[in-house]
Image (tube, helix red, strand yellow):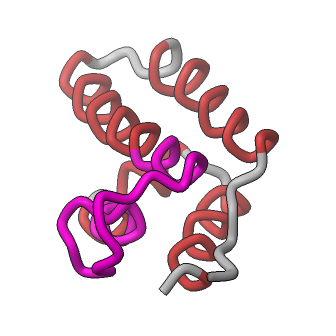
Amino acid sequence: MNNKCLTDKEFLEFARIYESSICCGITEQEGQTNARLIFADLMAILIKIKTNFRCCENKECPANPIRQLRLLLNNSSDVLHKHLYPKNIEILQTLINENK
């Protein structure tokens, strides 16, 4: 299986965005709470992808991190697009597309 992997630099960029934009950059409580939850999910998913953690090989399994990433990107697009740079969104899309 020739999967696209997340580089250390790419992973650390997502962590930096979480720390600077989400933890320090949002002043309203409700918006910060929502964004923190979404980014916590994103970081957990990216850790699974980075470490190639899979419970099973079923690509539609609810625990599959690529499926989780696809759903998170679809369901939380507004928050992710607000806080991520276009290149970061492109990295996420590439992870999804190249790991089908």
Number of labelled discs? Answer: 0
Image x and y of residue 83, in percent: 52, 43
Quadrant for the N terminus in the image: bottom right
Specify the quadrant of the image occupied by residue 37: top left
In percent of the image, x 77 and y 50: which residue is there? 7
Specify the quadrant of the image occupied by residue 75: bottom left
In percent of the image, x 32 and y 65: which residue is there? 64
Front-most of residues 28 and 75: 75
Vertically, is 37 above or below 10? Answer: above
Q: In the rendered structure, which segment of residues is drawn in magenta? A: 45-72
**Residue 2 left/right relative to 79:** right
Front-most of residues 57 and 93: 57
**Residue 77 appears in view:** no
Front-most of residues 24 and 49: 49
Image x and y of residue 56, in percent: 30, 67
Image x and y of residue 47, in percent: 51, 41
**Residue 58 appears in view:** yes
In percent of the image, x 55 and y 26: which residue is there? 21
**Residue 25 left/right relative to 15:** left
**Residue placed farthest to the right in the image?**
9
In percent of the image, x 73 and y 61: which residue is there? 87
Vertically, is 99 above or below 26? Answer: below
Vertically, is 26 above or below 3? Answer: above
Image x and y of residue 54, in percent: 38, 59
Specify the quadrant of the image occupied by residue 69: bottom left
Residue 54 belongs to magenta span: yes
Residue 14 belongs to magenta span: no
